[in-house]
Image: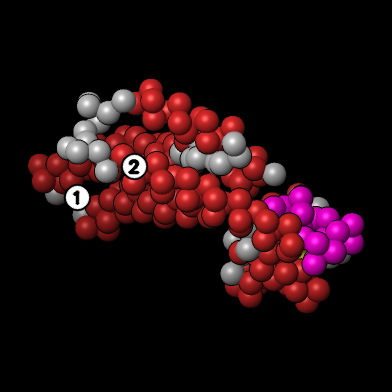
């Protein structure tokens, strides 16, 4: 079966399927024409990967399990320890947040920011993890870039469309000609918006953007 069919069966984007192939988690066969040909075994493998990723198991650990280098039991046990670590980190963040809220009339201007940061750094040295802004903001930056790019292109096309409509108001064109001239920029704008929506979906759920964590 083709990748589009696999995408529908497993509810994993084509981009993520390709990512898993690049990571060595999936090795589909090839048809005579050279295109990838996926079988039921590949569908099952993707479902297995999806299950482990839903549990936040890192790619490296999934690869080790699939290769038989690590048992599933050992992998999940290690994952439970990771949950405990994350729970402790969340508790630490909650504690600092509650401490800030307990201050009378707390404002950002009146806050001893340096003291707060020193406390957080001390907790990080003790093993707690606070938010890494540089990692968490990467999706927002990519989405903003995509939106700006689309907006610029649309802004360049709109004057042409407005010009056509203005010219038609001055000297009406035959309806078929007007429709043809208006259809081109409208279709281009619609395609840009459709591509933008798809790109934002990919950015939000793109497994490839998480690769740096492993």
Whether residue 72 appears in magenta in the rendering, the answer is yes
Mark seen at residue 99 = 2
Whether residue 95 appears in magenta in the rendering, the answer is no
Q: SS at mark 2?
A: helix
| Image location of residue 130, percent across then percent down | 50, 40
Residue at screen point 73% across, 57% down: 78
Q: Quadrant of residue 162?
A: top left
Say which of 75 and 41 sits in front: 75
| Image location of residue 8, percent across then percent down | 60, 72
Range shown magenta: 57-75
Q: Quadrant of residue 18?
A: bottom right
Pointer 2 local density, CA inside 10 Å: few below 14, some 14–19, many at least 20: few
In which quadrant will I find the N terminus?
bottom right
Residue at image mark 1: 173
Say which of 10 and 196 sits in front: 10
Say which of 19 and 211 sits in front: 211
Q: Is residue 40 above or below residue 59?
A: below
Q: Is residue 163 above or below residue 26?
A: above
Q: CA distance from mark 1 to mark 2?
A: 70 Å
Pointer 1 local density, CA inside 10 Å: few below 14, some 14–19, many at least 20: some
Q: Quadrant of residue 10?
A: bottom right
Residue at screen point 64% across, 42% down: 213
Examine the residues drawn in magenta and state their main secondary structure.
Answer: helix
Say which of 81 and 18 sits in front: 81
Give the residue at the far left of this rendering: 170
């Amino acid at each position: 079966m083709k990748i589009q069919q696999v995408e529908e069966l497993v509810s994993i984007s084509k981009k993520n399927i390709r990512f898993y192939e690049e990571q060595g988690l999936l090795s589909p066969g090839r048809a005579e024409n050279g295109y990838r040909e996926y079988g039921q075994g590949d569908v099952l493998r993707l479902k297995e990967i999806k299950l482990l990723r839903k549990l936040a198991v890192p790619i490296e650990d999934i690869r080790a399990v699939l290769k038989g280098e690590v048992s599933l039991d050992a992998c999940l046990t290690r994952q439970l320890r990771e949950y405990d670590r994350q729970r402790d980190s969340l508790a630490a963040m909650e504690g600092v947040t509650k401490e800030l809220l307990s201050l009378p009339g707390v404002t950002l201007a009146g806050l001893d920011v340096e003291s707060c940061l020193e406390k957080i750094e001390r907790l990080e040295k003790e093993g707690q993890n606070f938010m890494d802004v540089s990692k968490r903001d990467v999706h927002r930056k990519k989405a903003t870039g995509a939106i700006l790019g689309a907006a610029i292109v649309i802004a360049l096309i709109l004057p042409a469309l407005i010009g056509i409509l203005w010219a038609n108001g001055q000297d009406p064109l035959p309806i078929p000609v007007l429709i043809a001239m208006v259809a081109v920029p409208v279709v281009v704008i619609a395609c840009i918006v459709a591509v933008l929506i798809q790109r934002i979906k990919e950015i939000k759920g793109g497994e490839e953007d998480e690769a740096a964590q492993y």
